[in-house]
Image: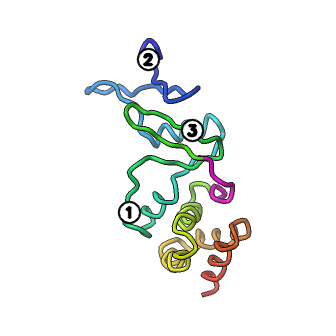
């Protein structure tokens, strides 16, 4: 890092910069997060706000890069960009990066008030297998979410 061959992203986290004809830069946030997850054996996924936007449940676009992790909360700096990793409960990370996992985090972010209307929308958008996976995993969710998922499955 002192010789400029590595970028120090955080405590004990070093990244190799990407060289291009425009100079050197930090790797993309997604690349850095995936490498960290693979190296440390953690589950690292986007937050519910980002997932809700990706699934079309909200038009709000998150400005900051925030990810949920099974590891400890910490901040990484990739060049001038800060990436926040927040420790999350196991049920939010249970289905990982699969479509059903994205739906769980989006629903958790939306909250109990909007969960049922969002589930009606998700039932049409998600593949049947992904929605079935969501229903199968319902017992490990908080009570309000599990009830909403089971209710949406029977409608």
Q: Position of residue 116 (x, y in %)?
A: 55, 79
Decide: few, some or many residues near mark 3? Use Cα within 10 Å; few <14, some 14-19, many ≥20.
few
Identity of the residue drawn at 64% across and 68% down: 133
**Sequence order check: which comes first, mark 2 or mark 3?**
2
**In contact (CB < 8 Å): disc 2 and disc 1:** no
Identity of the residue drawn at 56% across and 61% down: 105
Identity of the residue drawn at 59% across and 61% down: 101
Q: Nearer the viewer, mark 2 or mark 3?
A: 3
Instruction: Please state the extent of the stretch shown in magenta in the rendering.
Output: 87-94
Label 2 vs label 1: CA separation?
38 Å
Label 2 vs label 3: CA separation?
23 Å
Helix, strand or loop at label 3? It is: strand
Decide: few, some or many residues near mark 1? Use Cα within 10 Å; few <14, some 14-19, many ≥20.
few
Task: Quickly name the residue at label 1.
Answer: 60
Identity of the residue drawn at 52% across and 26% down: 14
Using the rendered view, name the quadrant where residue 19 is placed. top left
Q: Position of residue 95 (x, y in %)?
A: 64, 59
Q: Position of residue 106 (x, y in %)?
A: 52, 64
Instruction: Look at the image and say whether residue 109 sits in the magenta stretch.
Output: no
Task: Quickly name the residue at label 3.
Answer: 74
Q: Which mark is residue 5?
A: 2
The vertical placement of 7 against 92, above or below, is above
């Amino acid at each position: 890092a002192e010789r400029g061959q590595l970028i120090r992203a955080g405590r004990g986290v070093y990244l190799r910069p990407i060289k291009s004809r425009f100079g050197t830069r930090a790797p993309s946030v997604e690349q850095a997060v995936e490498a960290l997850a693979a190296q440390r054996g953690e589950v690292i996924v986007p937050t519910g706000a980002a997932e809700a936007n990706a699934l079309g449940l909200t038009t709000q676009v998150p400005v900051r890069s925030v990810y949920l992790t099974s590891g400890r909360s910490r901040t990484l700096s990739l060049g001038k960009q800060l990436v926040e990793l927040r420790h999350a409960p196991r049920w939010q990370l249970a289905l990982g990066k699969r479509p059903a996992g994205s739906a769980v985090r989006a629903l958790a972010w939306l909250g109990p008030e909007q969960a049922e209307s969002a589930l009606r929308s998700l039932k049409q958008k998600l593949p049947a297998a992904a929605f079935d996976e969501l229903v199968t995993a319902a017992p490990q969710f908080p009570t309000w979410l599990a009830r909403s998922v089971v209710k949406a499955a029977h409608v």
